Image (spheres, rainbow, N blue to C red):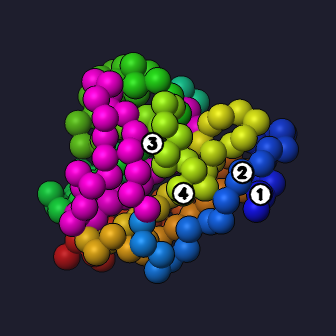
């Protein structure tokens, strides 16, 4: 099944079913900034706030990343903030270093597209990720899921942050 979304003024498609609240979070692998493999198993047992962006080099993605990064300053060590895109790890590392970000795990799906296929976020025509947000609890269940139909819009980050705070008590 595919669904139509917008990337600015362009009509694009994303394959797969949207993950819903109550679903188990699919295991996935991606690439860390140092080009080593990342496995979502590394963060199991923690609360995960997964921020999905098309590209760190766009203003909307920068705003989304900044908002979640600022919120993460108040999270405990039981919470992991993950920002995932199809950017090269070098671009993610540059952004993280330029902005002096240390509490946000940037990972890239550009080699495997494993996350994007399992979470139904791959924009077929552009090979970028559809802007979305997921909160996964310590039991690996999705407790918040938001897929945006227009990639130039910001997610409802306040909702996701509140859910993380409630879980992090």
Question: Mark 4 or mark 2, which has the lower sequence index?
Answer: 2
Residues at marks 4 and 3, CA–CA distance in whole angstroms: 12 Å
Q: Number of labelled discs?
A: 4
- Report, in whole angstroms, how far the alpha carbon at label 3 lies from the one at label 2: 17 Å
First to last magenta residue range:
26-55
- Report the residue marked by disc 2: 14
Q: Is residue 76 above or below residue 138?
A: above
**Disc nearer the start of the sequence (1/2):** 1
Residue 99, image quadrant: top left
Q: Secondary structure at mark 2?
A: strand
Dots 4, 2 in contact, CB < 8 A? no
Does the magenta-highlighted stretch encompass residue 103?
no
Badge 1 or badge 4: first in the primary sequence: 1
In the rendering, at what x and y percent does residue 34 appear? 28, 24
Answer whether labels 1 and 3 touch (C-beta < 8 Å): no
Query: In the image, which disc is placed on residue 2?
Result: 1
Judge whether residue 40 can be spotted in this image: yes
Q: Are marks 4 and 3 in contact (CB under 8 Å)?
A: no
Return the residue nearer the eye: 83 or 141: 141
The answer to whether 100 is drawn above or below residue 10 in the figure is above
Q: CA distance from mark 1 to mark 3?
A: 21 Å
Tell me which residue sits at (27%, 55%) in the image: 41
């Amino acid at each position: 099944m595919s669904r139509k979304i917008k990337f600015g003024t362009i009509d694009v498609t994303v394959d797969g079913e949207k993950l819903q609240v109550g679903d188990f979070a699919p295991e996935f692998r991606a690439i860390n900034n140092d080009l080593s493999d990342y496995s979502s198993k590394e963060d199991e047992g923690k609360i995960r706030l997964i921020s999905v962006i098309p590209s760190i080099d766009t203003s909307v993605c920068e705003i989304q990343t900044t908002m979640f990064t600022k919120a993460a300053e108040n999270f405990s060590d039981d919470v992991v903030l993950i920002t995932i895109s199809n950017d090269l790890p070098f671009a993610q590392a540059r952004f993280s270093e330029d902005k002096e970000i240390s509490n946000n795990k940037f990972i890239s799906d550009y080699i495997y597209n494993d996350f994007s296929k399992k979470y139904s976020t791959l924009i077929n025509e552009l090979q970028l990720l559809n802007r979305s947000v997921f909160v996964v609890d310590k039991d690996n269940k999705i407790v918040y899921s938001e897929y945006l139909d227009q990639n130039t819009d910001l997610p409802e980050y306040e909702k996701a942050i509140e859910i993380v705070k409630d879980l992090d008590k």
